[in-house]
Image: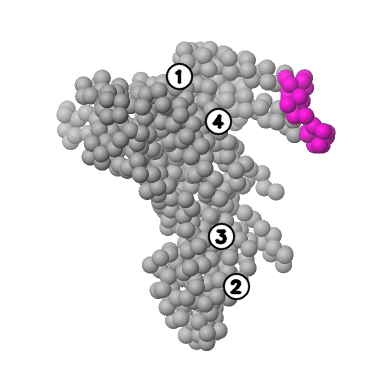
Amino acid sequence: MASDEELFRKIIAHAKEYGYVFPSSEIYDGLSAVYDYGPFGVELKNNIKEYWWKSMVQYHENIVGLDSAIFIHPTVWKASGHVDAFNDPMIDNKDSKKRYRADMLVEDYMLKIEEKIEKEVTKAGNRFGESFDEKMFRETNSRVQENLKKVAEVKQRFYPALDRNDLADVKLLIEELGIVCPVSGSRNWTDVRQFNLMFSTQMGSVNEDASDIYLRPETAQGIFVNFLNVQKSARMKIPFGIAQIGKAFRNEIVARQFLFRMREFEQMEMQYFVRPGEEMKWYAYWKEERMKWHLSLGIPAEKYRFHDHEKLAHYANAASDIEFKFPIGFKELEGIHSRTDFDLRAHQEYSGKKMQYFDHELNESYVPYVVETSIGLDRTFLAVLSQSYREERLDDGSERVVLSIPARLAPIKVAILPLVKKDGLPEKAREVMDSLKYDFRCFYEEKDTIGRRYRRMDALGTPFCITIDYQTIQDNSVTIRDRDTMLQERISVYEIGEVIKEKVEVAR
Ligand code: ATP
């Protein structure tokens, strides 16, 4: 079996070969952590966006959309705290010259110990079988207890140091824990420094008039500054949400994880405005709703988990991540944050404009509290892609690579394949294609043997292949082949639309 690292490399190569994702400006050796989506990637991406938009906006009467500009008044980022606090602590290894996020080095250290604990528990479970009392084992096994204590001690020292912005202590901790650079293996570290992740540029043509502005590092602020415009124009009553899909930019320190950590990426965010004091109820509600959404994609539940934050961002009073098991391990896919009234209040203060809502039921005005759901589109794309990629050995000894992308997200829904390139079969196939192409994204192919065409469609993730053969000419029947089971069925051309629709229909 391929190691996770090997698997990750294969997925990246497959994504390029099959027109999903290309490194940006590849002919110039690429641009670090920037990627372009190819002909099939853009379809998958659009399908994910559409699925999210439908489930958030179309299925919720009290959520509306917005498309705010990427450029935004620079004071917005001062008010939101991004100018002063959107930093990551970075550290360099003097021998390898590699740069790391200091917080990630420590978190990875803790993760490794936690993995050791889990291994110990699994091993004991296998040894004791049915009679295994996991809770008791965790509470009494000396090695587990020792490791739990180690993690607790690191946490106790690490998070307060970050909160105090005591970077010298973070460095000391890295040294004391004996954390080494994965590349050089050495402990020869520089001091820890804060690094602001926002890209800045100038607006205006003449240098003297130009003012510094930022490329937005999150889409949320465009929603906050439009809060009253949206509320009034769409006549929204609290609780209500504003959803937005758009690009965000971060000058990430560590950027070597394909679509997982990009410098230009896309977010799908929803800010939900609620009465002060009711935010925890809605926070719990959206945690559950968002997990349901992920599961509705048809990906197994064990690939997801919640990770409640211990260290909260400056704006939050509760925060949790939905993590996904990528080939690089369990990592954040979506954040659900209770942002309090921090942003609206800050904009009220900096702009001098009231950011209040008059609640007719309570007969009072207040600055609403906000619960946010923020999911990375590119990370969702990577989750779907890595979950779908499979290498299979078939009964006849041959191998195939298949992308089992859920049918509703698949870039191409159906391939139309005439068995041979003669005897009127291509013409008949075109007829079938014409009857389907307004409802589904279709793909026509007549070159190569039918077997090779099936393999290509498997590797591309196309859930259905329709083959037009000699019998089609006689009785208007075709074969429909299922990508995952490879089973073929004979159906009438008039049934194709219904059969496919049933599989690709968006679940509610
Ligand atoms: P991380 O801890 O991984 O840096 P974050 O906590 O900074 O992520 P948020 O600010 O909560 O991320 O952003 C919301 C979502 O946007 C994340 O859950 C993730 O899916 C996505 N996202 C954030 N940064 C990136 C990035 N550099 N590349 C791709 N997606 C990203």
The kind of residue tagged 2 is Glu
Q: Which residue is disc 1 drawn over?
A: 193
User: Can residue 453 be spotted in the picture?
Assistant: no
* The disc label shown at residue 459, or none: 3
C-alpha separation, residue under disc 4 versus residue under disc 3: 33 Å
Residue 329 seen from this side: yes
Residue 182, given in percent of the width and then of the height, sits at 61, 30
Mark before the other along the chain sequence, 2 or 1: 1
Q: Earlier in the sequence, mark 4 or mark 3?
A: 4
Marked residue nearer the N-terminal end (1 or 3): 1
Image coordinates for residue 295, horizontal then vertical, percent: 54, 45
What distance separates the C-alpha of mark 4 from that of mark 2? 44 Å
Does the magenta run of residues contain 310? no
Please name the amino acid that badge 3 sits on. Answer: Ala
**Mark 1: secondary structure:** strand
- Foreground residue among 6 and 119: 119
Q: Earlier in the sequence, mark 2 or mark 3?
A: 3
Q: What distance separates the C-alpha of mark 2 from that of mark 3?
A: 21 Å
- Neighbor class of circle 2 (other Cα within 10 Å; few <14, some 14-19, many 20+) is few
Q: Secondary structure at mark 4?
A: strand
Asked which secondary structure carries label 3, the reply is helix
> Which residue in the protein does label 4 denote?
307
The answer to which of 454 and 297 lies nearer the viewer is: 297
**Mark 4 or mark 2, which has the lower sequence index?**
4
Q: What range of the chain is rendered magenta?
A: 123-145
